[in-house]
Image (cartoon, rainbow, N blue to C red):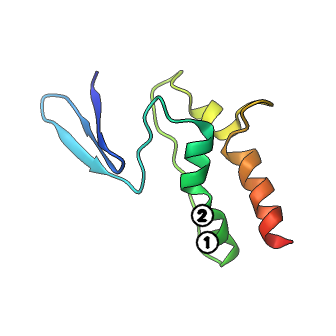
Amino acid sequence: MCVEINDAMSLTVRGRIDNVYNFDSVFGPDTSQEQVFNETKRLIQSAIDGFNVCIFAYGQTGSGKTFTIQGNQELPGLTPRSITELFALIS
C-alpha cells in the first residue's frame, strides 16, 4: 500500500521519498459514515457563524469518496446529514 495512516491526523505517502502529510482529520477505510459526520459536524456551526468551510475527500478512483459525501438511504453521507444538522441548528 502506498498510503499509510499514521494516526487520526497524519498519513505517509510511500514512494522514492516518503512524504508525511498532516490534516485536521484522517479517516481509514473502516471508518463509518456516522464517525465521519460526528467528526465534521462542528463545521456546520462554523458555517452558520460566518466562516468558510470546506470538506476535502481524497482517494483513488473507486475508494468511496462519493459514498462518503452522498451515502444512500440506509447510510446517509455527509451532505444529507449536514443539511439535516443545518436546519436543526437554524430552528
Q: Secondary structure at mark 2?
A: helix
Residue 24, relative to residue 73: is it above or below?
Answer: below
Residue 18, relative to residue 46: is it above or below?
Answer: above
The x, y position of residue 11, in whole percent, is 29, 41
The x, y position of residue 50, in whole percent, is 65, 78
Identify residue for label 2: 43
Q: Which mark is residue 84?
A: none
- Residue 33 lies left or right of residue 15; in this view the side is right
- Quadrant assignment for the C terminus: bottom right
Task: Estimate how packed mark 2 is, as few (under 14), some (14 to 19) or many (20 or more) residues with alpha carbons within 10 Å.
Answer: some
The x, y position of residue 46, in whole percent, is 61, 71
Type of amino acid under label 1: Ser
Residue that appears at 59% across and 69% down: 52
Identify residue for label 1: 46
How far apart, in angstroms, are the residues tagged by discs 1 and 2? Answer: 5 Å
Residue that appears at 62% across and 58% down: 41
Task: Estimate how packed mark 1 is, as few (under 14), some (14 to 19) or many (20 or more) residues with alpha carbons within 10 Å.
Answer: few
The x, y position of residue 80, in whole percent, is 76, 46
Give the image quarter of residue 33: top right
Residue that appears at 34% across and 51% down: 9
- Quadrant assignment for the N terminus: top left
Q: Residue furthest right?
A: 91
- Residue 49 lies left or right of residue 91; in this view the side is left
Give the image quarter of residue 70: top right
Residue that appears at 22% across and 45% down: 20
Q: Are marks 1 and 2 in contact (CB under 8 Å)?
A: yes
- Residue 25 lies left or right of residue 40; in this view the side is left
Comparing 35 with 23, the one in front is 35
Q: Secondary structure at mark 1?
A: helix
Q: Residue furthest bottom?
A: 49
Residue 20, relative to residue 42: is it above or below?
Answer: above
